[in-house]
């Protein structure tokens, strides 16, 4: 069983498994937009924005792409805070 320290809050009470995260990127770059569309096509896109603007795209080791409405820096800071 995974404990709370194995999850990271990505906004609006949505959490992901920390050890599955490969990258947290800005959604505005053209390659990231293509990655989002490919994930949508393959049914591997998870929208955790609760209808808000996408500010971070989280890529997992299972090729899932998770959209978050909090800044990439905030997600990274939450990960760092978990490590301490």
Image (spheres, rainbow, N blue to C red):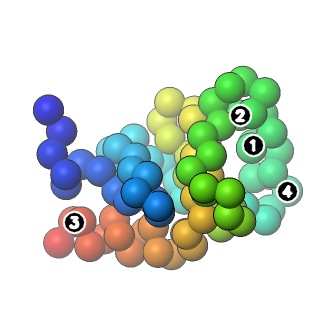
Q: CA distance from mark 2 to mark 4?
A: 14 Å
For residue 83, which numbered disc appears in the image?
3
One can see residue 26 in this view:
no
Q: Secondary structure at mark 1?
A: helix
Q: Which residue is mark 2?
A: 39
Q: Which residue is mark 4?
A: 30
Q: Residues within 10 Å of mark 3 (few under 14, many from 20)?
A: few
* Distance Cα–Cα, label 2 vs label 1: 6 Å
Instruction: Kindly identify the residue that appears in the image at 14 percent across and 32 percent down.
Output: 1
User: How crowded is the residue under tag 1: few (<14 C-alpha within 10 Å), some, or many (20+)?
Assistant: some
- Contact between marks 2 and 1 (CB within 8 A): the answer is yes
Disc 2 or 3, which lies upstream in sequence?
A: 2
* N-term mark: 4 or 3: 4
Q: Residue at x 50, y 41 (%)?
A: 60
Q: CA distance from mark 2 to mark 3?
A: 29 Å
The secondary element bearing badge 2 is classed as helix
């Amino acid at each position: 069983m995974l404990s709370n320290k194995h999850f990271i809050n990505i906004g609006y009470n949505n959490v992901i498994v920390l050890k599955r995260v490969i990258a947290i990127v800005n959604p505005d770059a053209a390659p990231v937009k293509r990655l989002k569309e490919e994930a949508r096509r393959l049914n591997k896109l998870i929208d955790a924005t609760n209808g808000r603007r996408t500010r971070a795209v989280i890529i997992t080791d299972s090729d899932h792409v998770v959209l978050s409405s909090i800044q990439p820096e905030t997600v990274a800071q939450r990960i760092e805070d978990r490590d301490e």
